[in-house]
Image: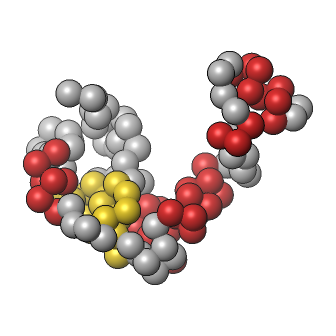
Amino acid sequence: MTYYDICNYVGCVSPDNIVLGNGSMELIYRFAEALITGGEALIPVLSFMEYERVSLLVSARPKLVSMQPDFSLDINSLRRMSTMKLVCCLYATRTVPLGSSLTAT
């Protein structure tokens, strides 16, 4: 299987937008190395604990954001913690335990 096969299967995707890896952890580390080295990363708590670990590995500053009692993400807390050094927010939709998805609204 080639990048072009994947693009044809998915549809309307350029091979430049495909990143392959040996599982999600490798892709998370590659993403961190490429994009957040030396910056800040917002990480909701409770979340995938590897996000904090990978941030520290690439000399980024993890900023932990508490979730609401129902495990939903508090967008206002994220806004308050955002700074000019913020590079990304590491958040998995359907976060554990029993969290809700983040919507566009």
The percent coordinates of residue 60 (x first, y second) are 41, 75
For the C terminus, which image quadrant?
Answer: top left
Colouring of the image: secondary structure
Q: Is residue 60 above or below residue 102?
A: below
Q: Is residue 56 above or below residue 17?
A: below
7 vs 63, nearest the viewer = 7
Residue at image location 19% in from the left, 54% down from the top: 78
Q: Does residue 49 appear in the picture of this structure? A: no
- Asked if residue 7 lies left or right of residue 72, the reply is right
Q: Is residue 49 above or below residue 97?
A: below
The percent coordinates of residue 74 (x first, y second) are 15, 46
93 vs 84, nearest the viewer = 84
For the N terminus, which image quadrant?
Answer: top right
46 vs 54, nearest the viewer = 54
Would you identify the image quadrant in which residue 16 lies? top right
Residue at image location 31% in from the left, 65% down from the top: 86
Residue at image location 29% in from the left, 34% down from the top: 102
Q: How many marks?
A: 0
The percent coordinates of residue 13 (x first, y second) are 66, 28
Residue at image location 27% in from the left, 54% down from the top: 44
Q: Does residue 6 appear in the picture of this structure? A: yes
The percent coordinates of residue 3 (x first, y second) are 81, 36
